[in-house]
Amino acid sequence: MDQVEIVNPTIRNMELSMRLSRRVLFVCPETFIQVLDAHNLSHARFAEHLQVSRSYWSQLLNGRRHLSPEVRSRMLESRYLKGIPEASLWSEATPARVAAHG
């Protein structure tokens, strides 16, 4: 007889969220520069919109920092990024890139 696994959707979503939060993602600067230009936004204004410092935003954009799960979540909710596929916003880091950026 086949066993049926009953999984609580809330638990499944939490497990997925935990797996995603462990991924090391870097923003795709070309996409963000296009978005800022299209909305006539300065880097300082966009950083404020994301509730991050200008310095942190600069580090993200220049590939010196990886994306935190909290900021990724804010970006997904951003009115300026609606409709843009995630694959265009960031990419998963390679092991060499992670080692280079600590």
Image (cartoon, grey):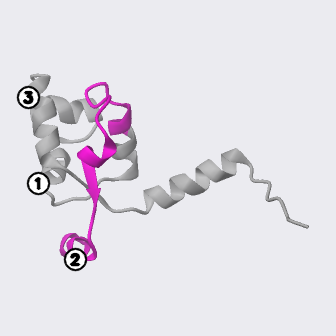
Crowdedness of circle 2 by 10 Å Cα count: few (<14), some, many (20+)?
Answer: few
Query: Rounded to the nearest whole Å, what is the CA distance between mark 1 and mark 2?
Result: 17 Å
Q: Quadrant of residue 62?
A: bottom left
Q: Is residue 44 visible?
A: no
Is residue 88 on the magenta stretch? yes
Is residue 87 shown left or right of residue 21? Answer: left
Quarter of the figure with residue 86: top left
Q: Amino acid at mark 2?
A: Ala
Q: Earlier in the sequence, mark 1 or mark 2?
A: 1
Magenta stretch: give its range: 74-102
Q: Nearer the viewer, residue 44 or 78?
A: 78
Question: Residue at position x 35%, y 45% from top?
Answer: 72
Q: Amino acid at mark 1?
A: Asn
Q: What's the mark number on residue 37?
A: 3
Q: Residue at x 18, y 74 (%)?
A: 100
Q: Give the x, y percent position of residue 37.
A: 8, 28
Q: Which residue is mark 2?
A: 96
Is residue 83 located in the magenta-colored stretch of the structure? yes
Give the number of callouts: 3
As displayed, is residue 29 above or below residue 46?
A: below
